[in-house]
Amino acid sequence: MKKNSRLSAVLHALLHMAEHDEPMTSDALAQCLSTNPVVVRRTMGLLRDAEIVTSERGHAGGWRIAVDLSSVTLRQLHETLGEPAIFAIGNSNEDSQCLVEQAVNAALEDTFIEAEALLLKRFGEITLADLARDFARRHAQWHQQKELENES
Amino acid sequence: MKKNSRLSAVLHALLHMAEHDEPMTSDALAQCLSTNPVVVRRTMGLLRDAEIVTSERGHAGGWRIAVDLSSVTLRQLHETLGEPAIFAIGNSNEDSQCLVEQAVNAALEDTFIEAEALLLKRFGEITLADLARDFARRHAQWHQQKELENES
DNA sequence: CGAATCGTAACAATGAATGTTACATGAAAA
DNA sequence: TTTTCATGTAACATTCATTGTTACGATTCG
């Protein structure tokens, strides 16, 4: 199965947008994400429908963040993207008449539900602001590293 | 992403085999699983390499369980099947130079690791014997239901 | 008007899982 | 020994979701 990477992509895009005052064009974002502007529009369109970003057409148009970074969790973004399937493994025959299969499905299903609950809980605890903070930390560290390299 | 259902399939097959004293042919198992005998051989072959089942060719041949049901956990089976990817969502660009992406990846990665650990822990706690027991329970319940229906 | 930009439909490419065909190999029955 | 029933396995086909691409319409600004 090819992995769905939209959550990763929108996070990447949103943090880049957060670093910009001007709106960012789909082309610019596509370059950041190493992808295609149409893919950016398609995906960001979902965030616009949820009023997390706004888009403007024409000259000097582009995408802008419309909310406070601390008010958006990864879980919200996951939902906004349509809650894509989290697991790449699953039952072969979701509702079979076979009692053996039902027993198998039930055991697996329980486990998946539990793991999914944990994952969504964690996603609910992480905001865009948290990621921006972590980025800032990495950025500062990177600067320090650079200076050390220049001194030597 | 199309879901990987091999774990589900082998569990289903193993429980059916546990109900049989004679070895079961790939054809018979394929019917149980609504699939193709070659797929059965391919998948069961991995379990044979791990000595969880044995296969015999020729007349009256087929597949047989080679271990005690209580000694095999779902986690072992997952490993035997090559530890296929558990998640259907992930990072777009695993090792990017972009510090923004690194921050995003780190946050997601942490969450995935935690959820995966929980899932594997649960898989490690469930044996084939547990599933067989659950099947027996469902089977008994189904009989009861039948009798009630016949009385009325 | 014309260039920049999003909006969107339609289609192509990619990749992973599963299914299928074909044939070789081995074992037991006739 | 020949036939039949099995597994073993390579090669190829199908299916399905994700992502990428092309094309063109709609809008905004200079």
Image (tube, coloured by chain):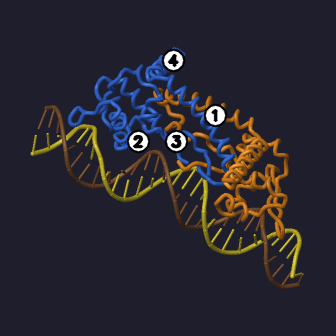
Chain colours: A blue, B orange, C yellow, D brown
The residue shown at (31%, 28%) is A64
Question: Which residue carries the number 3 mark?
Answer: A85
Please say if B80 is above or below A47.
Answer: below
Closer to us: D24 or B63: B63
The amino acid beneath tag 1 is: Glu
Image spot of residue B128 (x, y percent): 77, 44
**Quadrant in the picture for residue A132:** top left
Which chain does the residue under circle 1 lie in? B
**Marks 2 and 3, how far apart in space?**
22 Å
**Marks 3 and 1, how far apart in space?**
15 Å
The amino acid beneath tag 2 is: Thr
Question: Which residue carries the number 2 mark?
Answer: A35
Question: Which residue carries the number 1 mark?
Answer: B116
**Marks 1 and 4, how far apart in space?**
30 Å
Of circles 4 and 2, which is in front? Answer: 2
The amino acid beneath tag 4 is: Gln
**Marks 4 and 2, how far apart in space?**
28 Å
Crowding at dot 2, Cα within 10 Å, few <14 / some 14-19 / many 20+, comes out as some
Please, what secondary structure does the residue beneath circle 2 have? loop
Q: Are marks 3 and 1 on the same chain?
A: no
Q: Are marks 4 and 2 on the same chain?
A: yes
**Marks 3 and 4, how far apart in space?**
36 Å
The residue shown at (74%, 38%) is B126
Of circles 3 and 1, which is in front? Answer: 3
Please, what secondary structure does the residue beneath circle 1 have? helix
Of circles 2 and 1, which is in front? Answer: 1
Question: Which residue carries the number 4 mark?
Answer: A141
